[in-house]
Amino acid sequence: MSTRPSGVLALGLTLSLVLGGCGGPGSSPAPADAPGRSPAAAPGSSPGAPPGTATAPTDAPALPRVSLDLSGDLQRVLDTRAAAVLAGDRAAFLRGLTRSPGLRVTEGGYFDNLAQLPVSVFSYRLVPSSLVRTGDAYSAVVEVTLQLTPYDVTPVRTIDRFRFVPAGATSYRISSTTDTRWEAAHLGVQQPWDTEPVRVREGLGVLGVFDTADRREAAGIVASVERGVTDVAARVPYSEWGSRAVVYVLSDPRFLAGFDDLPGGDPEALDGVAFTVPGRDDGTIASTRFALSPDLLPAVSARRVDPEVDRLVRHELVHVALAEHDDAAPVWLREGLAEWVSVQALPPDRRDVPDRALAAAADIDEMPSDASFNDDDAAVHYALAWWVCEWLAQTYGPDAPWTVLDTFATRAGDDPRDVVRDLLGLSVDQLARRGAALMASTYAAPTPAPNQVPSTPSSDATDEG
């Protein structure tokens, strides 16, 4: 089962929403200096302090002299950190941190993750209006900009909350990059390199991100995606995706669990899912990526081809290739196209349909709705959607399914039932019945030949009566 959630990655939250939860009443203070990207909470601001300020306890050390351009001082710390990432300078990256051993270990792991990625743009921007002082430390919202080249068409902007502590008269170091309570309220899905150690493997037009896969398994997945990219690029009539793809195979379920509308709601029950990564607040999509279940890893290796894994990969790659072309299309068309294209590389006798779908074909009377498509009858719905596209191709020609998709794009916002009726002269449910009938007739068992009557004995045979 597979689908492409739409707009589920909350990576491009508007700044106004972000700042609404920072520094004002009800906002949680930044965590104290502690190991990792999940430090413990720090003491809060003193009661009665004006928004955005905090008074130090009477036994606290004297505060450092604050320059007239505090935000500029903190921004320089961030600029040095970003320059270290782009230069691959791990030592310079760690010099911007406090001496907490745990923090240095986890932030060093974060740097190692980034060092494996094809990062062409990386920067931080401190939001001055979000600054909050807690004791001798300052917390602020930081906008992170990252672009993977050539896989992202535009930089991806995300947000985080950093904590800074004095390191001299007007110099500062980072003591935390994590505020668990604030992140729970403001962040959506975080990329795997932000949360766990990853191993990155790149192929021809393929970027693979893994956590527990061994070398042969990772190579097998990348090879499968390379084959799929070649096949899908030859069949899907859109070129904006550039015949490139980013694939995740993660045993840690946190990434998929972060999706709001994950089909079925169980990340461990999915074989694959495609998703969009917003680039900016204006709704621009930086990339469409996909994730595969780690359960598929044993089926692949550097020298082994698994037809079922390849078919699933082609399905997900169709979603990547379609990108925003199918935004206005109903789910049955999105998934039908992905299934239809995924089987074209197989000989007809290898294009399997679930027995459950064939058993249900005779009773199919309507097209599944978007809301019910991934319910308990999802296997039937996917097969039906595929054969609706097959019926379109066999009836009107191989370009017909794409013509239907393009029509939905030009009539975005119209009732899908009206679009189908105006284009085909059929209702959506009539279209479903035709697809089901074609599926049933294609896989119907052949009628056995009648028994042959024995030939009449020759004239010289003796008739025993």
Image (spheres, rainbow, N blue to C red):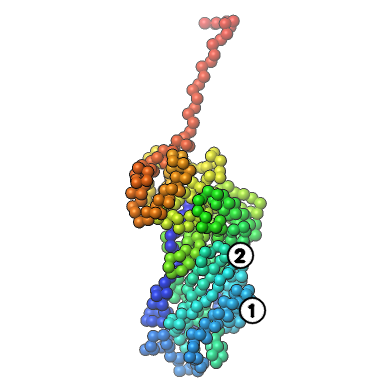
Residue at position x 53%, y 48% in the image: 235
> Is there any visible trace of residue 50 in the rendered image?
yes
Above or below, 198 relative to 318: below
Image coordinates of residue 335 in percent, x first then y, are 45, 51
Mark 2: give few (<14), some (14-19) or many (20+) Cα within 10 Å. Answer: some
Query: Mark 1: which secondary structure?
Result: helix
Residue under circle 2?
A: 199
Residue at position x 48%, y 37% in the image: 443
Image coordinates of residue 208 in percent, x first then y, are 58, 60
Above or below, 237 relative to 189: above
Residue under circle 1?
A: 91
Residue at position x 38%, y 81% in the image: 24
Image coordinates of residue 226 in percent, x first then y, are 60, 54
Above or below, 292 relative to 195: above
Instruction: Tell me: 413 left or right of 145.
Output: left
Above or below, 211 relative to 406: below
Query: Mark 2: which secondary structure?
Result: strand
Amino acid, disc 2: Arg
Mark 1: give few (<14), some (14-19) or many (20+) Cα within 10 Å. Answer: few
Amino acid, disc 1: Ala
> Is there any visible trace of residue 258 in the rendered image?
no
* Tally of numbered tags: 2
Image coordinates of residue 216 in percent, x first then y, are 65, 57
Instruction: Tell me: 249 left or right of 393.
Output: right
Outermost residue toward the right? 303
Return the residue nearer the eye: 382 or 330. Answer: 330
Return the residue nearer the eye: 142 or 358. Answer: 142
**Res. 350 mark:** none
Sequence-first disc among 1 and 2:
1
Rendered image quadrant of residue 113 = bottom right
Instruction: Tell me: 16 left or right of 244.
Output: left
